[in-house]
Image (cartoon, rainbow, N blue to C red):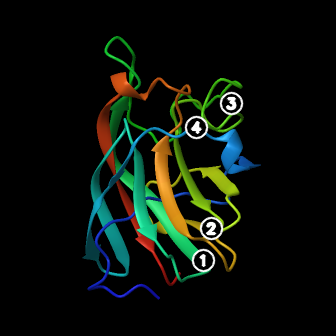
Amino acid sequence: MISRLALTAILVTMAFGTAQAQVTSSDVTLPGGVWCTGTWDGDFAKFENCASNFSNTISGNVGVTEVSVYVSHVGYSNGKESPRYTSPTGTGQAAPSNFTFPGLNQFGLVFFWREPTGQITAANITATDRASAQKFNLGSNASAIYVVMNDQVGAYDDNWGAFDIYINYNP
């Protein structure tokens, strides 16, 4: 269990969702990373204003095997002339092979975690409230959890906007 005092930031990656992908770290090129600032909102850790142009680290040395996750205040775009996405599913279409997570939602929010072996497990985030929070089984070895907007590899610098993510470490 992560202590409330020790909790400072969370970046989420999820294992279950509408689609699931498992890739090794050599298959994934992530944008630069940042930490989201965390506070508590009841049973959920709340991470506000996570940026759409970074790989947001939510927690290192996870210490739990399952989490529940949902997002709110979604408002981001993949470029100046691109549409604004207000749903975590982005376009709702499967991303092609030139995206960070092919097969997951194009421009959607992706929850993922890294195993000590370097393997990454990732899934779409679709939940937008506590009642529909998604449960993810992290296994026993997750070394960190993250969340990122699924964009083309190397194309994160023109993204703008943010989202809030909520995580329950004891669902």
Q: Secondary structure at mark 4?
A: loop
Residue on which disc 2 sits: 136
* Snapshot quadrant of residue 166: bottom left
* 72 in relation to 38, above or below: above
Residue on which disc 3 sits: 94
Q: Position of residue 20 (x, y in %)?
A: 72, 50
Quick one: label 3 or label 2, which is nearer the N terminus?
3
* 128 in relation to 54, above or below: below
Amino acid found under the numbered disc labelled 4:
Thr
Q: Secondary structure at mark 2?
A: strand
Residue on which disc 4 sits: 29
Name the residue: 39% across, 15% down.
Answer: 82
Residue 98 in view of the camera:
yes
* 62 in relation to 111, above or below: below
* 134 in relation to 71, above or below: below
Q: Secondary structure at mark 3?
A: loop
Distance between the alpha carbons at the discs numbered 3 and 4:
18 Å
